[in-house]
C-alpha cells in the first residue's frame, strides 16, 4: 500500500491537499482532505515538510490518538499524519478530514470529521507504509481558494 498526498493549493496561511491510500493493485481504498502549514523553507513549527517520498509507521500518540508517524523528513522529527485536537492545529503535522470548512469565521479553512477520518485511515493502513507527497499547485486564483471554502466532501466511503 501507498499513501499519496497531492498538495493542490497554498496561501500564506495554509496548504491544502488530497490524500489517497492505494492498494497494491493501485486502486484507491480511501481518500480524504489534508491541511498543513504553508511552505516556509522547512522551518520547524512554521512550515510544511518538503515534498518527497517518506516511510511511515502507524502510531498511537498519547496526545492525538491514532496517527501515522512520518520518518526521514530532512531536519525534522515528530511529524504526524493525524487528526486535530483544536482548529488549525497544524504544527508538526498533516491534518486529515472529510471536508474543508471555515468553522470559526477566520481566514483559515478547517477540516471536519478529523478524528473519524484518521481512525478510518489508521484501520486501513498497514503498520508500515510509504507516503509520497507531491506539490501539484496551480497558479493561485482567489476564486479557486474561495471555491474550496464550500462544504464539499471528498467522494469515498463515508
Image (cartoon, rainbow, N blue to C red):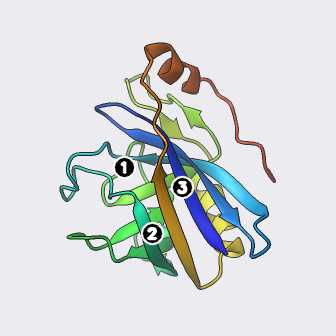
How packed is label 2: few (under 14 Cα within 10 Å), some, or many (20 or more)?
some
Q: Are marks 2 and 3 in contact (CB under 8 Å)?
A: no
Q: Is residue 12 above or below residue 68?
A: above
Residue marked by disc 3? 5
Q: Is residue 89 left or right of residue 138?
A: left
Q: Earlier in the sequence, mark 2 or mark 3?
A: 3
Residue marked by disc 1? 89
Please provide percent x and percent y for residue 15: 40, 41
Q: Earlier in the sequence, mark 2 or mark 1?
A: 2
Tell me the tag on residue 53: 2
Query: Is 18 in front, or is 108?
Result: 18
Quadrant in the picture for residue 91: bottom left
Q: Is residue 47 left or right of residue 69?
A: left
Q: Are marks 2 and 1 in contact (CB under 8 Å)?
A: no
Is residue 66 in view? no
Q: Secondary structure at mark 2?
A: strand
- For the point 70% across and 66% down, which residue is it? 22
Query: Is 95 in front, or is 138?
Result: 138
- For the point 77% across and 43% down, which residue is it? 155
How packed is label 3: few (under 14 Cα within 10 Å), some, or many (20 or more)?
many
Label 2, label 1: how far apart the Cα atoms are: 24 Å
Label 3, label 1: how far apart the Cα atoms are: 19 Å
- For the point 59% across and 85% down, which residue is it? 127
Query: Is 108 in front, or is 74?
Result: 74
- For the point 58% across and 58% down, which residue is it? 115
Q: Secondary structure at mark 1?
A: loop
Which is in the foreground here, disc 2 or disc 1? 2
Is residue 154 in view? yes
How packed is label 1: few (under 14 Cα within 10 Å), some, or many (20 or more)?
some
Please provide percent x and percent y for residue 35: 46, 46
Q: Secondary structure at mark 3?
A: strand
Which is in the foreground here, disc 3 or disc 1? 3
Amino acid at each position: 500500500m501507498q499513501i499519496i498526498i497531492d498538495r493542490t493549493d497554498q496561501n500564506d496561511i495554509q496548504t491544502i491537499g488530497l490524500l489517497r491510500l492505494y492498494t497494491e493493485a493501485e486502486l484507491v481504498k480511501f481518500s480524504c482532505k489534508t491541511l498543513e502549514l504553508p511552505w516556509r523553507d522547512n522551518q520547524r513549527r512554521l512550515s510544511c515538510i518538503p515534498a518527497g517520498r517518506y516511510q511511515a509507521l502507524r502510531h498511537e500518540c498519547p496526545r492525538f490518538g491514532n496517527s501515522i508517524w512520518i520518518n526521514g523528513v530532512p531536519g525534522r522529527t515528530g511529524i504526524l499524519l493525524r487528526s486535530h485536537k483544536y482548529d488549525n492545529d497544524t504544527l508538526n503535522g498533516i491534518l486529515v478530514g472529510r471536508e474543508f470548512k471555515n468553522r470559526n469565521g477566520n481566514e483559515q479553512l478547517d477540516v471536519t470529521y478529523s478524528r473519524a477520518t484518521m481512525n478510518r485511515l489508521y484501520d486501513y493502513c498497514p503498520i508500515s507504509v510509504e507516503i509520497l507527497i507531491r506539490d501539484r499547485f496551480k497558479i493561485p486564483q482567489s476564486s479557486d481558494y474561495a471555491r474550496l471554502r464550500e462544504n464539499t466532501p471528498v467522494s469515498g466511503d463515508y
